[in-house]
Image: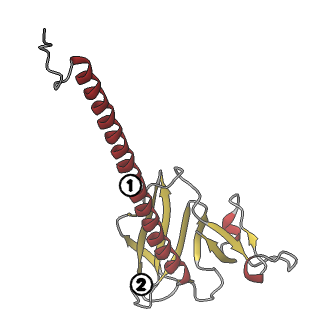
Amino acid sequence: MRDTRDSHGLSLVELLIVVSLLVMFATMCVMLLNSFTSMTDETQASQALASDTRIAMDGIGRDLRQAQQNDAEMTNGAFSVARPTYAQFFVDTDHDAKPERVTYYTAGTTLYKVIAYPVGAAVPFTFGSTSTPTPVLEDLSVPDAAVFTYYSSDVDSSTVGLTGYAFQQVTATDPLSYATKISLVRV
């Protein structure tokens, strides 16, 4: 007698094995794609944050380099407030020969900038209207983080710091006593 079974087809067991292997391969491909997409998103977010931080630091640095005094005797310094989370100083932002009072402060995880415009025509200027607080940098790593560190050059010469000059860090407990002597700000 002849065998009537055709040996060219697949059995049910073979079909189940092939389907199982295809499902496992597809699952691994989806997991790999999700991992790659997640890694790409994290990299892009990190680059965007670094770019935003660089832009903010450039703006703050530009304002700090242009800081000036708001008194006729030139003895009060450029800072009216100098705290780790709050800096207020005078800058001629609109180049009209009158310094505006620029304030940077943190609220939560955001660094804001506010500009107060001068009133009057002679130093010392008083300040009237202010701009709307503008977010300069969002997503600070720590809420209300210390953004500014102040240094004074009013120290003895035995403490040599950055670039060979003598600096003493202004403490957070009484920064206003050094406001007229602030020589360096680290952001």
Quadrant assignment, res 4: top left
Of labels 1 and 2, earlier in sequence is: 1
Of residues 82 and 45, which is closer to you in this image? 45
Quadrant where the image shows the C terminus: bottom right
* Residue at the (61%, 61%) spot, across then down: 84
Query: In the rendered view, would you say 149 is above or below 146?
Result: below
Identify residue type, mark 1.
Thr
Of residues 14 and 126, which is closer to you in this image? 14
Query: In the rendered view, would you say 8 is above or below 86?
Result: above
Of badges 1 and 2, the one in the foreground is: 1
Q: Residues within 10 Å of mark 1 (few under 14, many from 20)?
A: few
Q: Which residue is mark 2?
A: 120
User: Picture coordinates of residue 92 (x, y %)?
Assistant: 45, 84
**Residue 116, can we see it?**
yes
Kindly report the distance in space between the C-alpha atoms of the residues bearing marks 1 and 2. 54 Å
Of residues 20 and 11, which is closer to you in this image? 11
* Residue at the (21%, 19%) spot, across then down: 11
Helix, strand or loop status at disc 1:
helix
Quadrant where the image shows the N terminus: top left
User: Picture coordinates of residue 131 (x, y %)?
Assistant: 36, 69
Of residues 173 and 120, which is closer to you in this image? 173
Helix, strand or loop status at disc 2:
loop
Q: Residues within 10 Å of mark 2 (few under 14, many from 20)?
A: few
Query: In the rendered view, would you say 6 is above or below 42?
Result: above
* Residue at the (59%, 74%) spot, across then down: 79
Quadrant assignment, res 20: top left
Q: Which residue is mark 1?
A: 40
User: Picture coordinates of residue 125 (x, y %)?
Assistant: 48, 81
User: Picture coordinates of residue 138 (x, y %)?
Assistant: 42, 58
Query: In the rendered view, would you say 24 is above or below 71?
Result: above
With 149 as the anchor, is 109 left or right in this view? Answer: left
* Residue at the (44%, 87%) spot, across then down: 98
